Image: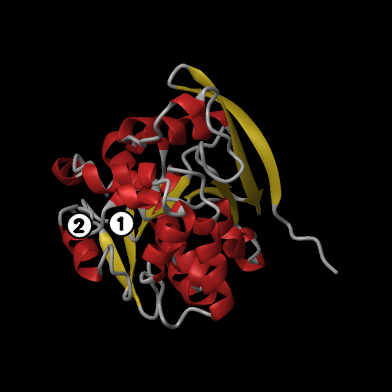
Amino acid sequence: MSIEPITGRYLSVEIAGAPRRIYFEEAGQGRPVLCLHTAGADTRQWRHLMNDAEITAHHRLIAFDMPWHGKSLPPEGFETQEYLLTTEAYIETVLAVVAGLGLERPILAGCSMGGRIALQLAALHPEQFSGFIAIEASDFQPAWYDIDWFHRPDAHGGEMGAALVSANISPYAPNAERWNTLWMFMQSGPGVFRGDLSFYTRDDSLIGRLAQIDTARTPVHLLVGAYDLTCTPEDAKRTAAAIPGATVAVMDELGHFPMSEHPQGFRPFFMDALARMARASAQAA
């Protein structure tokens, strides 16, 4: 019998002029690392790293559920609204969490749509962070699927979402973690995955901002799985090449959800990314 070191609490903030109750989990002490989940999922994707004593000995890992996701409820009146995530709302949410938790220039680590917004923040609000780990992140990925399938009366959106993302999980992923990852998508609220994908597949504003990212001020390191079909290694390398000074690593035997689908395979790449951030801070000091 054991109790995990992860603790969960709620943070009340204001976003778009309205109150939001945001669920977050944390573990460890030291340099803060704010972790962002993928589209249609939640904070549970980060649980393995948050239980890693070697990582949390020197890093305070914090992960939160975006509104509409996991334990963060939708806003009041959501039943009359269509959920469509925007770049502006996403940025405002991340910055509200940083301010609400009193984080002093944390490292931002985001995966998929979280990696996309990490690069947007690197371009637009670098002063708020000390570095960016953009996982499965690219400048823009147009949809190769019809996102409306994820919110229809004649189809189970969660199961449809899980079916889509199953092709993005590496064949090397342990079977238990493959299904744990898919379960999060099966549990997604009605229309939430569709609303996230609207941001991910329709907002191409990052393309024109990549060159303004100053990696001498805040380092940017991209991580991409060799088995990612949505954000391919070629996509990540193209994106890194457009950011002066950015670095990129291709992760063998990993797919689109590395921290969740194959945590042991992801661990050395994540630890290397954290070490890169530490070295950059030491050089800047």
Q: Residue furthest bottom?
A: 172
Q: Position of residue 136 (x, y in %)?
A: 34, 61
Q: Is residue 231 above or below residue 7?
A: below
Q: Nearer the viewer, residue 34 or 81?
A: 81
Specify the amino acid type for callout 2: Thr
| Residue at 45% over, 51% down | 40
Callout 1–callout 2 Cβ contact below 8 Å: yes
Specify the amino acid type for callout 1: Ala
Q: Position of residue 265 (x, y in %)?
A: 48, 77
Q: Which residue lies under the disc numbered 1?
A: 137
Sequence order check: which comes first, mark 1 or mark 2?
1
| Residue at 40% over, 77% down | 170
Q: Nearer the viewer, residue 247 or 142?
A: 142
Determine the secondary structure under disc 1: loop
| Residue at 62% over, 67% down | 54
Q: Is residue 208 above or below residue 155?
A: above
Q: Residue furthest front?
A: 154
- Looking at the rendered structure, which numbered label has been put on residue 232? none
Q: Residue furthest right?
A: 1
Q: Is residue 14 above or below residue 31?
A: above
Is any atom of residue 80 visible in this view? yes
Q: Which residue lies under the disc numbered 2?
A: 239
